[in-house]
Image (tube, coloured by chain):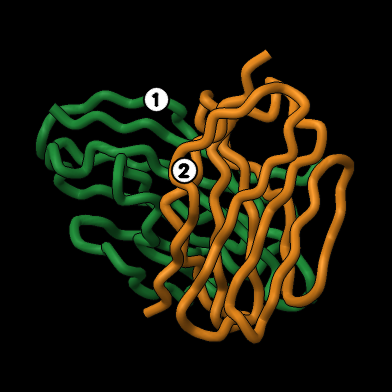
Amino acid sequence: EAQVTQNPRYLITVTGKKLTVTCSQNMNHEYMSWYRQDPGLGLRQIYYSMNVEVTDKGDVPEGYKVSRKEKRNFPLILESPSPNQTSLYFCASTSLTSKNTEAFFGQGTRLTVV
Amino acid sequence: KNEVEQSPQNLTAQEGEFITINCSYSVGISALHWLQQHPGGGIVSLFMLSSGKKKHGRLIATINIQEKHSSLHITASHPRDSAVYICAVQEGGADGLTFGKGTHLIIQP
């Protein structure tokens, strides 16, 4: 089954404690991205990657890092989380080589930073 | 930067009603996506459009490229259609998505 898998689904952490949210896709998609969703602001892009070892900033990259060492994985790293990073996070992937391809989203990670 | 506006923001209707959700954007795009987000939070892609019209079951999506406008229609609405519907646009093939703020739909039995 084609899917994007995020882990964990829920995470409560303390300010300053490094954390990683994993994202993996099994569709050989080139393009992967991270979004955060906040009430009243909708979904906003944090970082994206067009292929292995190619990453770039989205609209709200401050406080986040990503890596793309393998095509299937695109982890989101918070080196020193702060309360304003409390949010619902989604990873998504899509193909850049196929026309009319939909975007696939992970199940979401609800992060609370206290 | 593309500005994506959805209307209405909230919609409550009775079971069986015909539902229309609108999306307009400000800059030319290569594709428009309609997404559905259920209360559990997961996001599912309903349609990806670059022109014309697509139909899947009771859902119909249309796009008018010249007018920079798309509509999502639900025929014979059902309580299980209750969800947030999100419009997202993609300017180029390798660009990320810019999202509308969503339409919160409630279908009452």
Q: Identify the amino acid type marked 1.
A: Tyr
Look at chain A in the picture and name its colour: green
Image height check: is B18 above or below B16?
A: below
Q: Are marks 2 and 1 on the same chain?
A: yes
In the rendered structure, the answer to whether residue B92 lies left or right of residue A90 reads right
Q: Which chain is orange?
A: B
Q: Where's residue A95, x and y in %?
A: 70, 68
The chain under label 2 reads A
Task: Give residue A97's mark.
Answer: none
Question: At 62% across and 56% down in the image, what residue appears?
Answer: A72
Q: Where's residue B78, x and y in %?
A: 74, 24
Which is more toward the observer, B38 or B93?
A: B38
Image height check: is B96 above or below A27?
A: below
In the rendered structure, the answer to whether residue A75 lies left or right of residue A99 reads left
Question: At 61% across and 58% down in the image, what residue appears?
Answer: A93
For marks 2 and 1, give the CA distance: 12 Å
Q: Which residue is mark 2?
A: A22
Q: Which residue is mark 1?
A: A10
Q: Identify the amino acid type marked 2.
A: Thr
Q: Where's residue B99, x and y in %?
A: 46, 60
Instruction: Give the secondary structure at mark 1.
Output: strand
Label 1: how many residues lie within 10 Å, few (<14), some (14-19) or many (20+)? few
Question: At 43% across and 73% down in the image, what residue appears?
Answer: A55
The chain under label 1 reads A
Label 2: how many residues lie within 10 Å, few (<14), some (14-19) or many (20+)? some
Q: How many marks?
A: 2
